[in-house]
Amino acid sequence: MSNLIEINHITKRYEMGDNVVMALQDVSLTIRQGEYLSIMGPSGSGKSTFMNILGCLDTPTTGEYKFRGVDVSHLNDDELSAMRNREIGFVFQNFNLLPKLDAAQNVELPLAYAGVPAAERRERAVRSLERVKLADRMHHRPSELSGGQRQRVAIARALVTNPGILLADEPTGALDSKTGIEIMRLFDELHQEGNTIILITHEQDIANYAIRNVYIKDGAIHYDRLNSQRTIVK
Amino acid sequence: MEYSENIKVALQGLTDHKFRSFLTMLGIIFGVASVIAMLSIGEGAKREAIAKYQDLGVNNIIVREKDMSAAELEEVRTKFSPGLSLRDAEVIRDIVPGVSRIAAQAEVNAEVKYASQSVKSSVIGVTPEFYDILNYQIKEGEFITPIHYDAKHKVCVLGSGIAYALFQKEAPLGKMVKIEDQWLEVVGILENKALFTETVGELAARDLNTDVYVPLSMFLDRFSRGNVLASELQQLTIQVDNSDRLMETSTLIDEIIRRHHFGNEDYGIVIPLELLKQEEKERQIYNFLLGAIAAISLIVGGIGIMNIMLATVMERTREIGIRRAIGARKSDIMGQFVTEAVVISIAGGLIGVVLGVSLSLLVSVFTDVSTYIRLYSVIIAFAFSVIVGVVFGYLPAKNAANLKPVDSIRYE
């Protein structure tokens, strides 16, 4: 399969007054279409910085980040916004749904920023909610949904634009273990349907659901290997 | 992102925090209302002034005898002034260019009697020109005609006030009234005229509706004048063809009359149009001040909006982060928050328009200050409120747009 993401020797440097922090030093990584990958690391390892760059929320200080062969490391703010809109589907630990909007409106939102007409937006949002089995809750606000349901709305929102990657940052962190397993089962299904999934986590248990494990420590890749003890959700 | 989405989001935000939105709008509401009220009061005063001077005739120059005591009158007579007379009118007509008509009038205060009624009144002897030059309107019958004048008919025309006082429900036309020792036939009744509430130059404030008009020729023959030294006339109203030449013409008239009165200044000249212009100039300063105060209150309202918008942006940092993460550009965020500010100011502006209009109406109904609302003042006030929304919404929106997605998405 083709390379979806090619990261070559990127660094990220933060300057805080006189202190210079190297959050990432010389990280290279290639992700192919359809991969199921976890990026693990303790807090302060540079894992979040790496995720921000992967998710086009931030750009590297040096190095090259190619997405579908296009260098995105030097895009301007509007172009990065467009990248996030089209290619990145974010799933956050705390769901990050807009509380004033109902489930369907939340799912529609990325399409609104893509300029999709209202009728088509609604249709695609409903399909996306059907995919996560929440079509019957489409008119509920986040506060009227359980944690697991909220996370499924967030996944529906991430999927609605058919992005290149699903980028999930501690997706089970705010859920009880049973609900967490349900969410991981959903990711498994989505992977089998051909989606490229990147899990960011500090928990080995969660990382074990992925096929490939990348471990980041002190701003560099410590190991990058296939997962031999993969957890299979029944 | 379509713009209608922004409006939807802004309206949502407004209705989510009704009380807060209302408080935010208050400044704009009062700002817009006061702009409209102030402009309408200014406009009302202007219209009142124009009406007043229109009554005096904007093409007219009024020469009026000064109000003099018996001693003063004696003094000017000993200095050979003949006083204001028909001779003055003739000379002006012969010499001064651009004069179209001259009305002469002589006055005496007298009791007017009918049956058992008796009313104190100014009896004014006039030439027929008077009616046209001074913009009078007749309600019934006719005014003093050239026939009445030439034949010195013993007729009179009553002001609406005195007609009512004397006759109440009776029809006055054709009835005889008695003034001093003369019996006069009523041939006309005038329309009600606005009170002349301000003294203008030599023209004292008075109620024109209690005047009685008679032919000047008959008046000079038959009415006694209290003081034997009294001038023949009290007033000349001179109408010119062209109001641009009022100043030059009045200077010329002044010179002629002064010469004929042997240098005695026993008369005054009033030019209504000049007074109108002067008054307008004075009012302009006043209006500007009122407008400035109103504008300041609008600006204060704008600062109120900015204050709340800054707080809103802080409060919604997380929302901004989420929107940015799923693809909102800076300009989308900017548009969203500017729209919110503008929606608040438009809503405030609309309420302000309603309040301002009702305030102006209440003022004119419950006080004797007259107001007049012109459409342009409503449009100006409203447009200003929208501009205030844009201007004061800009900075908070800019702040919102410049939040870094990385930081704002994790903001707690």
Image (cartoon, rainbow, N blue to C red):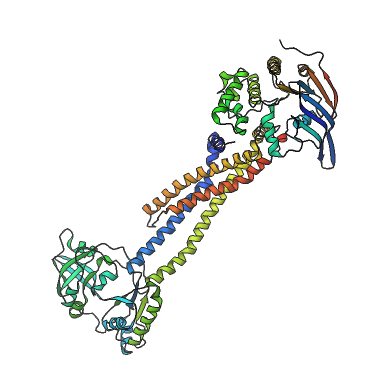
The N terminus of chain A: image quadrant: top right
Instruction: Give the residue drawn at x 37%, y 78%.
Output: B249
Closest to the observer, A44 or B174: A44
Residue B84, by quadrant, is bottom left
**Is residue B230 at all visible to an observer of this figure?**
no
Residue B135, by quadrant, is bottom left
Residue B228: percent from the left, percent from the top?
A: 24, 84
**Is residue B299 at all visible to an observer of this figure?**
yes
Residue A3: percent from the left, percent from the top?
A: 77, 25
Residue B357: percent from the left, percent from the top?
A: 42, 49
**Quick check: A18 left or right of B160?**
right
**Quick check: B213 left or right of B390?**
left
Q: Is residue B85 above or below residue B7?
A: below
Closest to the observer, B103 or B405: B405
Q: Is residue B192 above or below residue A53?
A: below
Residue A231: percent from the left, percent from the top?
A: 76, 13
The C terminus of chain A: image quadrant: top right
Closest to the observer, B409 or A80: A80
Residue B147, by quadrant, is bottom left
Instruction: Give the residue drawn at x 34%, y 66%.
Output: B54
| Residue farthest along the top direction in this orientation | A234
